[in-house]
């Protein structure tokens, strides 16, 4: 098994989140993982609460954004849905450098997609900012009779990497909101709350001048 890698922030001081023009924090989330594990389906379930059994492979990178409120903080989740196919790998990894978080997906009914998590983690470690947060996501949990990757295997691997773990089903919707919300909450606490605690101002524009800034959403 691989060495644990420090991709969850570790001892690097987190950067404050960027504040967008409309008073919401901008959070860039990347969907990564092998082709057909369900990245696009997870985004569509989360954003529009829909699901289709038809497989339309993603070409390059698709984009959607979704406004959420996390513990009172308005956040614009920018969902970058990357193509899992190998031929797009060099293109999609160009997007890693500006990510705040990753949803690293595999398919619980597809062993190779789980084996490849190590390679995806290596790419993230190499190209993504050290303060990004990661969720390991075993999708298609509804396919119980086709399951070849146990829940414990997924959880153990996530523990090794020190990242969060969820099993989801884009088909039933199970855990989908919970997974995205949990990732956004972790990012919010580290990149807003902790930064304010350090006097960082909680936003990368305007500056805090070392003083605690008023939270724009707190009235
Ligand atoms: N049973 C089941 N099928 C799913 C689930 N999520 C996705 N699928 C199906 O799996 C296939 C692939 O889903 P996509 O979301 O397109 O996969 P992807 O990871 O975006 O694939 P690429 O764009 O090629 O990287 C589709 O036929 C989906 O209907 C799930 O939770 N359960
Ligand atoms: Mg896709």
Image (cartoon, helix red, strand yellow):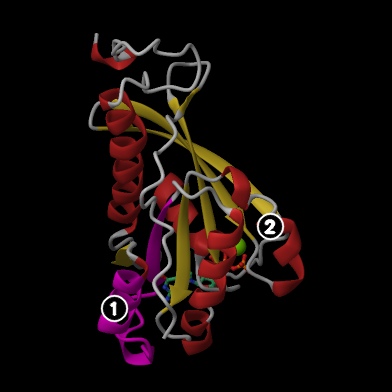
For the N terminus, the image quarter is bottom left
Q: Is residue 166 left or right of residue 6?
A: left
Q: Is residue 192 magenta?
A: no
What secondary structure is marked by label 2?
helix
The number of discs equals 2
Q: Position of residue 82 (x, y in %)?
A: 62, 57
Residue lying at 53% horizontally and 61% vertically, measured from the top left: 125
Query: Hey, which residue is sitting farthest front in the picture?
Result: 11
Compared with 7, 19 (above or below) is above
| Residue 156 numbered tag | 1
Residue 49 appears anywhere in the view: no
- Establish whether ligand 1 lies closer than 8 Å to the Cβ of label 1: no
Q: Position of residue 28 (x, y in %)?
A: 51, 41
Mark 2 closeness class: few <14, some 14–19, many ≥20 residues within 10 Å:
many
Compared with 88, 115 (above or below) is below
Compared with 11, 188 (above or below) is above
Q: Is residue 95 left or right of residue 130?
A: right
What secondary structure is marked by label 1?
helix
| Residue 92 numbered tag | 2
Mark 1 closeness class: few <14, some 14–19, many ≥20 residues within 10 Å:
few
* Residue 127 location, quadrant: bottom right
Q: Is residue 148 magenta?
A: yes
Compared with 171, 72 (above or below) is above
Q: Position of residue 185 (x, y in %)?
A: 29, 42
For the C terminus, the image quarter is top left
Residue lying at 52% horizontally and 38% vertically, measured from the top left: 65
Residue nearest the viewer, comparing 94 with 68? 94
Q: State the extent of the magenta-drawn residues as a range.
A: 133-160
Residue lying at 53% horizontally and 52% vertically, measured from the top left: 30
């Amino acid at each position: 098994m691989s060495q644990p890698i420090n991709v969850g922030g570790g001892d690097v001081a987190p950067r404050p989140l960027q504040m967008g023009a409309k008073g919401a924090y901008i959070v860039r989330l990347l969907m990564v993982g092998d082709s057909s594990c369900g990245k696009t389906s997870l985004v569509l379930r989360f954003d529009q609460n829909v699901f289709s059994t038809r497989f339309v492979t993603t070409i390059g990178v698709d984009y959607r954004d979704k406004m959420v409120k996390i513990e009172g903080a308005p956040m614009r989740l920018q969902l970058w849905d990357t193509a899992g196919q190998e031929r797009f790998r060099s293109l999609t990894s160009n997007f890693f450098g500006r990510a705040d978080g990753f949803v690293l997906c595999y398919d619980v009914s597809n062993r190779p997609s789980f084996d490849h998590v190590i390679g995806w983690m290596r790419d993230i470690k190499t190209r993504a900012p050290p303060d990004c947060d990661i969720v390991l996501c075993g999708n298609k949990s509804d396919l119980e009779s086709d399951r070849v990757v146990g829940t414990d295997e997924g959880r153990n691997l996530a523990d090794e990497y020190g990242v969060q773990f969820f099993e989801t089903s884009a088909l039933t919707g199970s855990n989908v909101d919970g997974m995205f919300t949990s990732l956004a909450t972790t990012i919010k606490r580290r990149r807003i709350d902790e930064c304010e605690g350090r006097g960082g101002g909680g936003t990368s524009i305007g500056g805090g001048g070392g003083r605690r800034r008023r939270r724009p959403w707190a009235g």
